[in-house]
Image (cartoon, rainbow, N blue to C red):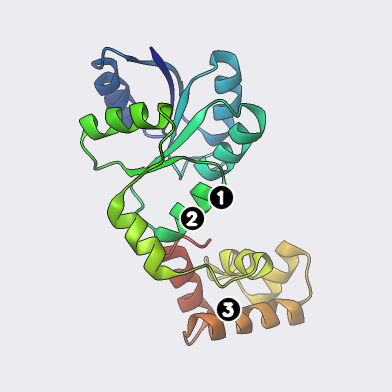
């Protein structure tokens, strides 16, 4: 029996996934989590073979949870299950230790098959997403640039971003100028939106 942990913040989606997986004779959902910070405690308590993690959850995202699982419970195979088909997310997921990356719109039979495949030692990635990730190339932004752009997403002023990140306004301007140039856009809001769309933030 393959033991599965299911992390998804929307109760209806989580319930539907759990019900569909329970129809499979060789898969059992042994734990459910609605928040990112519930994943590791639930996994340590139930020792699942596979963790299905949504990316965007309150209390920490699925990529951070995947990293924590890799460090604390390396026997657990992580599959990211998301509505966001962003190629940057795929790269970050694989760097976080995930062995699978599927879109939620995939049929339930495909999900069950993916669980079996990762248990057999395979990597399972949505093929269109894999192709997009290859064509996108690497994320050109440095970690500080990503941090500043993420802070700029809400439209905060340079002074507010500087205060939030404990950096000087000059440093914030330099990072924003570099990201605008690298991404070939005309202002910081365009840069932030583009980076978010690509899954780089």
Residue, disc 2: 91
In the rendered view of the protein, which quadrant contains the N terminus?
top left
Residue 98 drawn above or below residue 182: above
Is disc 3 in contact with disc 1, using a CB cutoff of under 8 Å?
no
Q: Residue at x 52, y 53 (%)?
A: 92
Name the quadrant containing residue 30: top left
In the drawing, what numbered circle is on residue 176? none
Secondary structure type for disc 2: helix
Q: Residue furthest front?
A: 121
Residue, disc 1: 95
Residue 159 drawn above or below residue 89: below
* Residue 47 pos. (x, y %): 55, 17
Residue 126 visible, this angle:
yes
Disc 1 residue crowd, few under 14, some 14–19, many 20+, Cα 10 Å:
few
Q: Nearer the viewer, residue 34 or 101?
A: 101
Among the two numbered marks 2 and 3 on one chain, the one whose residue lies closer to the N terminus: 2
Q: Nearer the viewer, mark 2 or mark 3?
A: 2
Residue, disc 3: 179
* Residue 190 pos. (x, y %): 46, 77
Secondary structure type for disc 1: helix
Disc 2 residue crowd, few under 14, some 14–19, many 20+, Cα 10 Å:
many
């Amino acid at each position: 029996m393959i033991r599965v942990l299911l992390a998804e913040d929307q109760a209806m989606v989580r319930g539907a996934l759990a019900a569909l997986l329970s129809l499979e004779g060789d898969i059992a959902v042994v734990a459910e989590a609605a928040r990112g910070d519930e994943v590791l405690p639930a996994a340590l308590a139930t020792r699942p073979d596979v963790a299905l993690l949504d990316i965007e959850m309150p209390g920490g995202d699925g990529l951070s949870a995947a990293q924590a699982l890799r460090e604390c419970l390396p026997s657990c195979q992580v599959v990211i299950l998301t509505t966001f088909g962003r190629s940057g997310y795929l790269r970050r997921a694989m760097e976080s230790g995930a062995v699978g990356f599927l879109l939620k719109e995939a049929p339930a039979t495909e999900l069950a098959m993916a669980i079996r495949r990762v248990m057999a030692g395979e990597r399972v990635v949505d093929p269109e997403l894999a192709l997009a990730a290859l064509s996108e190339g690497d994320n050109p932004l440095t970690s500080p640039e990503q941090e500043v752009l993420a802070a700029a997403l809400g439209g905060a002023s340079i002074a507010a971003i500087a205060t939030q990140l404990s950096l000087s306004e000059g440093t914030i301007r330099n990072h924003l100028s570099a990201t605008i140039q690298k991404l070939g856009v005309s202002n910081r809001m365009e840069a932030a939106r583009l980076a978010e769309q690509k899954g780089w933030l």
